[in-house]
Image (spheres, rainbow, N blue to C red):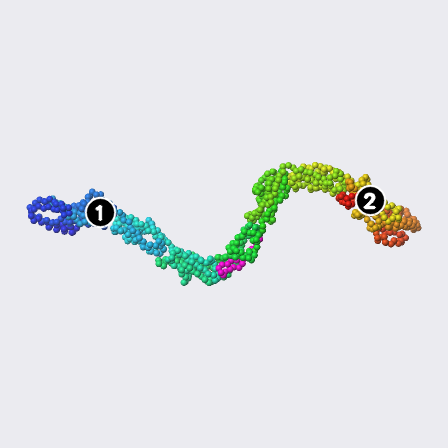
Amino acid sequence: MMLVKVLSVIYSLSLVLTDFTACAAQNSDDHTTAESSFPLSTPVYVTEPPVPSLQRRSERSDVFPSEKVELSCSVPSSAAWTFSWYRDTQQVQNTDPNVALSPDGSNLIITAATQSYSGMYSCKAHTSTSTTAVTTKISNSIKITVHANKPKPTLTRSSNFDKMFPGESVTFTCKVDVSDGWVYLWYHYETQVQASSIGTYTIASIDHPHSGKYHCQAKRANGPFHTEESDTTALHVSDPPKPSLKLLSPWPDVFENETVEFRCEVHSPDWTISWNKGGNEPGYELDEIQNAEGPFLNLTGIHDAYEGGYTCKAHLKSRGVSSGFSNTVNITVYDHTPIPALTRVPDFNPMYVGETVNLKCEVNLSSGWKYQWYKNGIEQQTTKETNSIKLSLSDRGKYQCRAARGEIISTEFSEEIKQDVLEIPVPSSKSATPLDVFPGESVKLSCAMAGGADWTFSWFKDKQPVRPHPTTSFDVGAATLSIRSASASHGGQYSCLGKLKSRPSVTSTSSPELTLSVYDAKPRVTLMQNPIHNVMHTEESVSFSCHINVSSGWEYLWLKDRTLLPESGKNHTIESVETKNTGSYQCQAKRGRGAVFSSDQSPAVRLDVKERPQAGITLLTGWSEVFSTDSLVLNCEVHGSQDMWNYTWYKADQLINLLPSKKHTVTPQNDPEQSQYTCRGISTGRPSYSRRSDSLQTKNLLLKRRVLLSISGCIVFGIAAVFLGCILLRVFRKSDDSEDKPAENELFLTMAQLRERDDATCPMVQYITDAELNAPSKEADENGTICSETTEIPITSQDEHVVTSETEDVTEKNGGLISFK
């Protein structure tokens, strides 16, 4: 302002008018000339008008739309000046809404709305008095630039790594290519993290929270104007890659002298590896393994000092980054080899053909084993841990296994497991009741298998499973199928199959089919007699048989004169008929339990029984002939019969092998021993034989005479003894004794009494024996009586044995009668 005042003074003093001429003013810029003033009558001093000074009061001359530029125009003079403003020689109109002037017009404020406000700005000053009007020269020019668009900052990052690791540093740079005076705003995602006049943003030690998208924006330091946002750049912060430690050896549990190999994997070639070993327990300090670099670690000659946990670590030396420790692989060192455990699934013995058994060989130490299988001491082909066998008969035997790995390690043999293999038994089905039944009858079918307690059973009718029904009773898995009341719908082919209780997958084949037939009518019953005779004789055998035209399993009822007999069975035989067996015979069949099914009664068969005639033996040799012959003639005859008979003879119940004859002679030659004789009549008609005669016991014919003499001597001795006894009694008897004693019995027996008594001292006849024929006669006893020590054999009657077959006696004589001599 002082400069303006000084210039104004100098200007007023320099203007001296020297004559009275008129003057005119001319603008050098627009070449305008003012009219000459009035003529000067006095001298005038003339000076140049001052030059306005144009200054920019705002910070910068390049602006962006909406920013303001303020210019100030000043004149070094104290006169009252007015100002006009020019842009590129064009006067700025104060009517423009984006242009504002101060009250005295010395300040111009431009709001840069568009790029058209760009240009060279200048000003002029004007003053006037009552006599003069002065306009200054044009001021200096100031260039104002209005940019068309907002600028967009450029964002760069100091490191171009896709991934950054915790602990590293990064610097972002934001640059605006136009203008200056910017304040830089930094954003992480949409959150402002920093505002600075420096166009860089540095993170000295990044971490995971620093990951994300970054961008920047610039603003005027003293104004609201903001640039556009820069493009985003992403910062990826991740942990260093964790190495993956792998055990290249197939097992982590090793035995002495084995080899172990590790590999540490990092998915980048720039990383280097370090190795560490520590204990198995958590928190155990890790020791770096010296002289171990690179991704592989080989341990040879293993012993117990090698046991522990191994780990590795990766390093990126170019950036000073180290990863964390890898996973830990523990190595266990054993000083002995294990014994494999051999197990069987399912654990059954025996098993059946077609089943699958899994034998598993397990080693409880380490891993990587290969297995060797042995059957009955012979090595098998399979080398798997589990030996799966679909059983056949050839697979039965004793199994063992052992394990091996590498070239030097092999276990002991496991214990043996014995596996027996059986054929699946075929069930057999049978019927406890007939298979052809009548409506209403019950049916019971059973299914059986070897080891039946271990099996359940299923029933099929016409190859379809039997379903529960009110008339059908069976438990699931039961071996018995019962039909309580048969009907036509029950007819068909029945079979069963078995399933093993412990393993239902084991199924047998079906049993042979049983055909069940259901009739629609009652059976017909027929009674037959054998032999077929209207009249039977006692001791004959007769048999009745009851026949039913269909089915089986019948129980038979027998009736005589409609009275139930105790006999049962299909046949009713009377081995030796009697007269009481005469009557009408019928049979009836029944079967089943509970509701018993019965047939109709058969037609009646009449049986008549007559008494068989009896033979009798008579002795033809008379008493008068005892002294003239030593033979005995027996005669057989059937009494009360008019039929023609022939006769057979029996000695001691044994048939005498002679031609049939009515008479039989007994001599000492053919009967040396004491015997009983019987006879029987035989005929070609009916009855074909008679009852046997009563038995006749023969005696020794050669001693007949001795017997008679002995009897006579006994009689004489007896008479004499009686006589002498009477005399002695008369002499010695007291008189009073006779009154008290009763009369005595006769002391001697008659001949008739002797014959009738079995205890007689002297028998009449003895059997003819060689010993007695040659025996000497006894001397007289003390009383002078001669007596033979023989025993009397009375003729007794015995029951005959029943002859069971008439044809037997006929065939003994060559099938017919033989005439007697």
Q: Position of residue 143 (x, y in %)?
A: 21, 49
Dot placed on the residue nearer the N-terminal end, 2 or 1: 1
Say what secondary structure mark 2 lies in: loop
Image side of residue 750 versus residue 525, left or right? right
For disc 2, the neighbor class at 10 Å (few under 14, some 14 to 19, many from 20) is: few
Image position of 607 (left or right of 481): right
Q: CA–CA distance between discs 2 and 1?
A: 186 Å
Q: Where the C terminus falls, by quadrant?
A: top right
Q: Position of residue 375 (x, y in %)?
A: 55, 56
Q: Is residue 7 above or below residue 274?
A: above
Q: Which residue is labeled 1 in the image?
A: 118
Indicate left or right for 554 with 370 as reference: right
Residue 820 disc label = 2
394 or 519: nearer the eye? 394
Q: Which contiguous range is marked in magenta? A: 402-420
Residue 499 drawn at (x, y percent): 57, 47
Query: Could you tell me the amino acid type at mark 1?
Result: Ser
SS category of the residue bearing label 1: loop
Give me the residue at 21% from left, 43% from top: 96
For image coordinates 58% across by 51% down, the residue present is 422
Q: Is residue 134 left or right of residue 706?
A: left
Count of numbered circles on the image: 2
Label 2 or label 1, whichever lies nearer to me, is 2
Residue 753: give x, y in percent of width and height.
Answer: 87, 46
Q: Residues within 10 Å of mark 1 (few under 14, many from 20)?
A: some
- Confirm whether the magenta stretch covers residue 418: yes
